[in-house]
Image: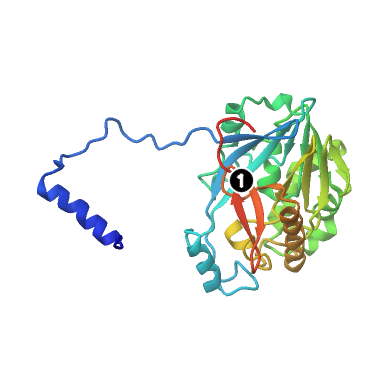
Amino acid sequence: MSHLSRRHLLAGTALVGVQGALPVSPVRAAAPPNGKQVASFYRYRIGDYEVTAINDGIWLPPIDDKFVRNAAFADVQNALAAAFQPTDKLPIPFTSLVVNTGAKLVMIDTGTGGQYAPIAPQSGTWDANFAAAGFDPRAVDTILISHFHPDHINGLKTKDGELRFPNAEILVPAPEWDYWMNDAHLGAAADSLRPAFLNARRIFSDIAKDVKRFTPGAEVAPGIVAIEAFGHTPGHVVFAITSAGQSMLALSDTTNNPWLFVRHPDWQANFDIDGPAAAQTRRRVLDRASADRMLVQGYHFPFPASGYITRTASGYDLMPVMWQAVVE
């Protein structure tokens, strides 16, 4: 069979119209475009647990040659272009998890709380998606926080400072608390970090006595273990979820955009507080996920933000899950 090029295919299509074999007529929409997506939540099972991914929209911040500290900007742009991504901004989706153990409703991170709208107008979908998934904030028993960046903790409170999950216990990594809530660290912080310090205090200061601090390595909810993953922030953790012989790893911000930091695990993003430690952690965690063939979830992966990690010659790659109508 001869090779059929795109040009020949398009030319042939045009010729059919010209010859009149398929009459050409104006096409008019029966209704104006809606402009909205359907509710974005996705469920899957880990053993006896039902896990629901809740989407909170996306942020598209501009990037420049300072975005990756140890790679040429041209290489970063080439990696984005190879993945059909824009080369002048970084798509950053937000997806948190709800784990239904059968006895408890456990949340892992809380989204932006609708408070990123000035910089990310396509974010702030979490409340609608949480409700569409059939959940009530009053029914949440436990909230596990991976680290204190605003897109992970702002959902704990409304813009007016009211707790959004009134019956939930809140658990945070002790090293993370010790870093962000320490006045000496605030005083020594670079100007770029000060807003995150102040935001952490806005969220936690008046509820400090009710916030439980855990040591990485501890079981923080039934079947959920927090694992040290320092570097992105000083107390950053990931969560291993295990039930009935199955397991998955909630990576949090171990890797951001997978086509950059999964494929190039040694690249250090400017939002990693300790870049070398973050890269070392990334390789360690991705090694475990690939060796154990574990399902993973990445907070900033494309929705539904889950898949499997495979090894490549130079790093790793993400194999996204297939969407299924039946929860399996």
Residue 307 rendering spot, x and y as whole percentages: 63, 47
Does residue 318 appear in this view?
A: yes
| Residue that badge 1 annotates | 305
Residue closest to the far front: 1
Rendering coords of residue 249 (x, y %): 74, 47
Q: Residue 220: percent from the left, percent from the top?
A: 85, 40
Q: Quadrant of residue 143?
A: top right
Task: Left or right? Give the position of 272 relative to 129.
Answer: right
- Is 257 placed above or below 150 here? below
Image quadrant for the N terminus? Answer: bottom left
Task: Please identify the quarter of the rendering in which residue 262 is found.
Answer: bottom right
Identify the residue at horizontal 24%, vertical 56% (top origin).
Answer: 10
- 25 or 46, which lies in front? 46
Identify which amino acid the numbered label 1 is placed on.
Ala
Q: How is the image coloured?
A: rainbow
**Which SS class for mark 1?**
loop
The C terminus is located in which quarter? top right
Circle 1 packing at 10 Å, graded few (<14), some (14-19), many (20+), is: many
**Depicted 108 relative to depicted 195: above or below:** above
Residue 212 makes an appearance in the image: no
